[in-house]
Amino acid sequence: MRFCHLSENFMSKKNIYRGGTMKVVVFTIVLLILFFVGSLLFSQYVNNSCQSLLKPIDALTDAITAENWDKTETTYKELRNIWEENERIWAYLLDHYDSDRVSLTLDKLQQYLLVQDRNLALSEVTELKFTINLIANKESFSLDNLF
C-alpha cells in the first residue's frame, strides 16, 4: 500500500519529469544532427579543396614530363597560391602532420623545378599527389574511418 502511495505521488509529478526528459532527448537529437551535418559539410569541404589542389598537380606533372619549364613555373605558382589559401583553414581542421608534409613537399618541389631536375620533380609531384589523396581519404565520411 505504501508503494502505491509513492507511485501515485511520483505519477502526479510526471509532467515535470517527462518534460525535462523530453527536453534532454530533443536537445541530444538536435546536437547529433548538427554533428553529422557538420561532419558531412567538413568532409565535403576537404574533398573539394583536395580536388582544387589535384588539378594543378596534374597539369604540373604534364609540364614536367614535357620539360616545359616556363609552364611548370606558372603552374607551380598557381598550386602554391591554392595551397596557401587552403593551409590557413586546414591548420584549424586537420592534423598538422599532413599539412606540414604537403608544405615540405612543395618546398622540395620548388627547388627541383629551379634546377630543372625532371626525375626528382616528378618524384615530389607523385608524393604530393599521394599525400593530397591520403588526406581526402582520411577525412572522408565513411564507415572505414568510423571504426
Image (cartoon, grey):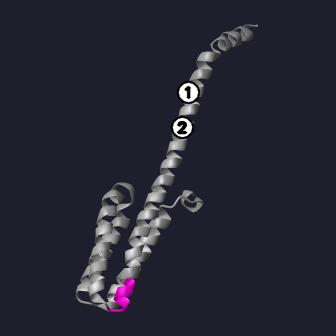
Image position, residue 124 (x, y; %): 35, 81
- For badge 2, the amino acid type reads Val
Residue at the location (28% across, 69% down)? 81
Assess whether residue 36 is covered by the magenta stretch: no
Nearest the eye: 64 or 141: 64
Task: Decide: few, some or many residues near mark 1? Use Cα within 10 Å; few <14, some 14-19, many ≥20.
Answer: few
Task: Decide: few, some or many residues near mark 2? Use Cα within 10 Å; few <14, some 14-19, many ≥20.
Answer: few
Q: Is residue 127 visible?
A: no
Mark 2 highlights which residue? 30
Circle 2: element type: helix
Vertical side of 79 occupied by 113: above or below: below
Q: Give the quadrant of residue 29.
A: top right
Residue at the location (29% across, 91% down)? 117
Residue at the location (59% across, 17% down)? 16
Image position, residue 118 (x, y; %): 32, 91
Circle 1: element type: helix
Residue at the location (31% across, 62% down)? 85
Mark 1 highlights which residue? 23
Image position, residue 60 (x, y; %): 36, 82
Vertical side of 1 occupied by 100: above or below: below
Magenta span: 61-67
Quadrant location of the N terminus in the rendered image: top right
Q: CA gap, disc 1 to disc 2?
A: 10 Å
Instruction: Compare marks 1 and 2 and give the one earlier in the sequence.
Output: 1
Q: Give the quadrant of residue 106.
A: bottom left
Label 1 close to label 2 by CB (< 8 Å): no
Q: Is residue 115 visible?
A: yes
Nearest the eye: 57 or 101: 57
